[in-house]
């Protein structure tokens, strides 16, 4: 079939076609530079190697060119097709490699970044004060005793000589578990427990720190708070021993200039009883806002163990005597750190808790 016979196809200009093939090859390589994703790459493949591409046209025209030109055109078309396919494949590999690199970078650990220090916990202010109180009494020969937080009402009240009409016995003032048990309202039942377990051995010389519970909730009262109970029983124990012990304690805790005073008071389980004040930790006794101008701060209650309580513990009040005291740990921590609201101890606010070492 000749060109003339078909009448449909232009005569093929082999030189021009070879030139255009070389141009197309250069053009593709240039366009590949700007192809950043697989979709663009596919677009270029269809355009330069697809059925309507110049390469496809050149190959299909082979039959219509003079035999002398055929090898030259065929070789060029095949070379260009192969070169284009190689260039597309090479660029596809480059895109894959770049993508892999990007993912690795996103996941990688940068070992040159500064580390994140772990958040270190620290002791709660109540724990700090409590441990200080314990250390002072341990150094004076006391040992630490404990008792349950759910206590028999007989131990919490009756055996401590607390009369049936005492307000703490009211359901409105205490958390009862059932008719005979409640959350202890003070650490004093440990006095009875310890004496009953140790009588008639002497001396009894303990402190009993722990949680106690009452139906109170305002800036200076919490339904749960901490006390430290103290008890000493031996032959010939007097009020002078009590006062000397508390003075030594106050000076260790608040500083060597600290003075104390005892004011007569009433507790069912001690006789006589006293409230103990320390000279104001803020003004030293001159009078200021913290002490309300009096120069004194009340920190604990104490007294000589009531003879009936000694008997209930298994000791003979004709033979032995003793003293007892009880202090609130929150109260002492508030004085120590100048804290005005007791509830801060239990709100777990790190901004507050981080201030204590
Ligand atoms: Zn003061």
Image (cartoon, rainbow, N blue to C red):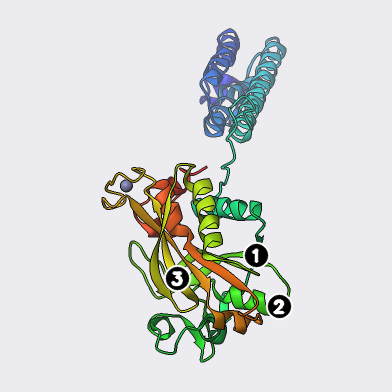
Question: Residue 15 at what x, y percent from top left?
Answer: 59, 7
Q: Nearer the viewer, residue 191 or 170?
A: 191
The quadrant of the picture occupied by the N terminus is: top right
Q: Label 3: how many residues lie within 10 Å, few (<14), some (14-19) or many (20+)?
A: many
Looking at the picture, does residue 279 appear above or below residue 60? below
- Work out how far the residue at label 3 is from the one at label 2, CA to CA, in angstroms: 24 Å
Q: Earlier in the sequence, mark 1 or mark 2?
A: 2
193 or 181: which is nearer to us? 193
Residue assigned mark 1: 205
**Disc 2 marks which residue?**
199
Is label 3 in a helix, a strand or a loop? strand
In three-dimensional space, the C-alpha distance between marks 1 and 2, rounded to whole angstroms, equals 12 Å
Residue 8 image offset from top left, x and y in percent: 51, 26
Q: Earlier in the sequence, mark 3 or mark 1?
A: 1
Q: Is residue 200 visible in this depiction of the protein?
A: yes
Work out whether residue 328 or residue 260 is closer to the camera in this orientation and state it: 260
**Which of the pair 318/175 is nearer the observer?**
318
Question: Which residue appears at 35% of the width and 56% of the height?
Answer: 341
Q: Sort mark 2 into few (<14), some (14-19) or many (20+) by Cα contacts within 10 Å.
A: some
Q: Earlier in the sequence, mark 3 or mark 2?
A: 2
Is the residue marked by circle 1 packed among few (<14), some (14-19), or many (20+) residues within 10 Å?
Answer: many
């Amino acid at each position: 079939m000749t060109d003339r016979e078909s009448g449909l196809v232009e005569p093929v200009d082999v030189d021009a076609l070879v030139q255009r093939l070389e141009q197309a090859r250069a053009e593709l390589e240039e366009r590949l530079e700007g192809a950043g994703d697989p979709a663009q790459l596919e677009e270029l493949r269809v355009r330069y190697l697809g059925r309507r591409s110049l390469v496809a046209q050149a190959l299909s025209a082979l039959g219509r060119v003079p035999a002398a030109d055929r090898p030259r055109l065929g070789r060029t078309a095949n070379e260009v097709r192969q070169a284009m396919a190689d260039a597309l494949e090479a660029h596809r590999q480059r895109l894959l490699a770049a993508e892999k690199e990007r993912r690795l970078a996103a996941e990688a650990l940068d070992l040159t970044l500064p580390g994140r220090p772990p958040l270190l916990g620290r002791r709660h202010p109540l724990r700090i004060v409590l441990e200080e109180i314990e250390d002072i009494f341990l150094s004076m020969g006391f040992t630490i005793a404990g008792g349950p937080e759910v206590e028999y009402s007989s131990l919490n009240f009756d055996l401590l000589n607390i009369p049936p009409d005492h307000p703490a016995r009211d359901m409105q003032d205490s958390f009862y578990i059932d008719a005979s048990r409640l959350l202890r309202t003070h650490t004093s039942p440990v006095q009875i427990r310890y004496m009953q377990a140790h009588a008639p051995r002497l001396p009894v010389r303990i402190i009993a720190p722990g949680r106690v519970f009452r139906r109170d909730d305002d800036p200076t009262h919490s339904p749960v708070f901490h006390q430290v109970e103290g008890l000493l029983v031996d032959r010939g124990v007097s009020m002078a021993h009590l006062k000397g012990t508390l003075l030594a304690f106050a000076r260790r805790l608040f500083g060597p200039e600290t003075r104390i005073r005892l004011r007569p008071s009433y507790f069912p389980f001690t006789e006589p009883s006293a409230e103990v004040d320390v000279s104001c930790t803020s003004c030293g006794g001159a009078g200021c806002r913290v002490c309300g101008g009096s120069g004194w701060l009340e920190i604990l209650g104490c007294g000589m163990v009531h003879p009936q309580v000694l008997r209930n513990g298994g000791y003979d009040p004709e033979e032995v005597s003793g003293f007892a005291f009880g202090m609130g740990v929150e109260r002492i921590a508030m004085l120590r750190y100048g804290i005005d609201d007791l509830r801060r101890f239990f709100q777990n606010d790190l901004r507050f808790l981080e201030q204590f070492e």
